Amino acid sequence: MKKILIIEDDKNMQIELVKLLSLAGYEALVLQDFSHSLEEIRKINPDLILLDIQIPEMNGELLLQSIRKESSVPVIMVTSRNNEMDEVLSISYGADDYIVKPYNPTILLLRIANIFKRMENPLNILTYDDIKVYPSKGILEKDGKILDLTKNEMIIFACLLHHRGNIVSRDELMTELWNNEEYINENALTVNISRLRAKLIEFGMEDAITTRKGQGYKLV
Amino acid sequence: MKFGKYIKDKGLEIFWFLLSYFFILLMLLAFKVNGEVLLGISVVFVLLFFSLLLTGYLKRRNFYTSLIQNVKGLDKKYLVLEMLNKPNFYDGELFYEILYEINKSMNETIKQYEYSLNDFKEYVELWIHEIKLPIASLTLMEHNQKGKMVERYAEQVRRIDDYVDQILYFVRSENAEKDYLIKETNLQQVIKQVALKNKDDLLAHDIQFIVDVQDEVVLTDAKWLEFIINQIVSNSIKYVRSDVSSVIKFTVSKTKTQTSLHIYDNGIGIPLNDIHRVFEKTFTGENGRKRGKSTGMGLYIVKRLCEKLGHKITLSSVVNQYTEVVLTFALNDFYKMKD
């Protein structure tokens, strides 16, 4: 399980972030002692850090600089300071991403997932049992047989595959599609999913995608 | 400064001079002074008087001419004292010192206002960062409670956030300081942020969101532009027409010197009488009155931000057909950040 460290001094935000990240399948920890941040970060050794700019003791940007001196752990800056200057500064200090409060929680999860994906799978080739999935080419491959998917179908399939075994809500799929600049509506999403299903069946994958009424979809 | 008017102003002195000359003449005649001495004394006396008059005039003319010219030429007239030489005659010196005192007290008053305005602006910005925290918490809570809380709550939280952004950018647009950063910005990326922000509203109203923008890069502040486009899009969502399937469409047109982003919707449009006033402060117009919930601030702030960033914004519309906003960005190397 990936360890995510939350550096944030607002109690409410801490509680909700821990809930959000745990539900998404991460181990979420909260930094307790702001006067010894660096030591605590070393001890916890997280896979990713969510760092607020306005924290006690030390400014988040300064903390980021000292983290960067010893580690290349991915850092997402999270702040209510909505201006371009802070973003450019944070990125130049070595932040991997910059998110402004209040953010859409689904998008925060997407950005986190993207960073992990980039780290672990730079070539971006996925596998689903004995099937190879090439998201950038839009194809699935099994024993030399190839299945072509449209861009939308591939986005949906990759998203379900990433959350394999878990339910993915329609809203999450929609956010993922819109995040890839495919601004489709509810009907189109339904159509895309049934087309994807039909194609998978043709490819010999019966019942790969199941529907949970009122909740979403699941890739088994 | 005119010599004639000056002489007129000196009427009293001239009167006293003539009177005293008349008495001297009488006295000299009474002592039976001979004609040549009389003439000599008269000439010296008259010359002396007129030279006094003339030097007085010239001193004042130098001072006042430069004062008048500077006041005319200066953009900020209250700075005139900085451009003026101290006069070398007594009433001028007094006048100069009084001007100096007035100027000083004026500057102090303005400074005071500036301080209190800055204090206020700083406090508003600080307050906005503070209020964003509970808004962010609420957003997360709503998400974590999916199923228990209704989507309508999330919508209200989004509305609060939009209004908070409005005041933030109002303060930024009214302020003389430069708190923006112009750099190369991808239009598609900014439009995507706006789309994601309004996703639920767009889906709820079943509005087709069409983005026909390739990898277009313009020089702007990405955050400010996001606010600008967000205002325009939320207006489009607010004023949809119910009898057609709604569309919001982004396209780009280019010339050698500029790039224009067109934001088109097929909503209710704006009446002809109102079009040229939509960017005015607190102007709500017919649509605002009919639908309510309009403060008339959104587009005003948008216009101010565009002015500060140096973008041109125009709007065209036909009632019950369409509204199109065009943002024009200059392609100018001058603004590019050096690496």
Image (cartoon, coloured by chain):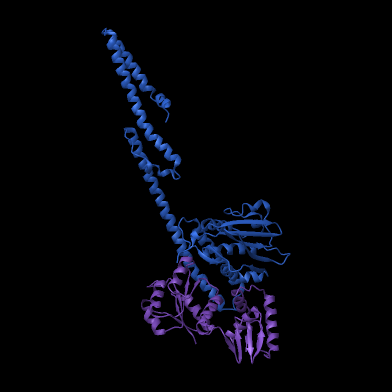
Chain colours: A purple, B blue
Q: Is residue A72 above or below residue B264?
A: below
* Residue B237: image location, x then y, percent: 64, 65
- Residue A73 picture quarter: bottom left
Position of B58 compared to B221: left or right?
left
Q: Is residue A118 above or below residue B49?
A: below
Q: Is residue B215 above or below residue B66?
A: below
- Can residue A1 be seen here? The reply is yes
Q: Residue at x 41, y 75 (%)?
A: A64
Return the residue found at the far right.
B243
Q: Which residue is at the front of the view, A193 or B83?
A: B83
* Residue B222: image location, x then y, percent: 52, 65
Q: Which residue is at the front of the view, B4 or B160?
A: B4
Q: Is residue B290 above or below residue B143?
A: above
Position of B202 compared to B95: left or right?
right
Q: Residue at x 37, y 28 (%)?
A: B57
* Residue A1: image location, x then y, percent: 50, 87
> What is the total number of numbered labels drawn onto the structure image?
0
Q: Which residue is at the front of the view, A94 or B294?
A: A94
Position of B175 compared to B158: left or right?
left
* Residue A56: image location, x then y, percent: 39, 72
Quarter of the picture holding the C terminus of chain B: bottom left
Position of A31 compared to A201: left or right?
left
Quarter of the picture holding the N terminus of chain B: top left
Q: Which residue is at the front of the view, B239 or B91?
A: B91
- Can residue B27 be seen here? The reply is no
- Residue A61 picture quarter: bottom left
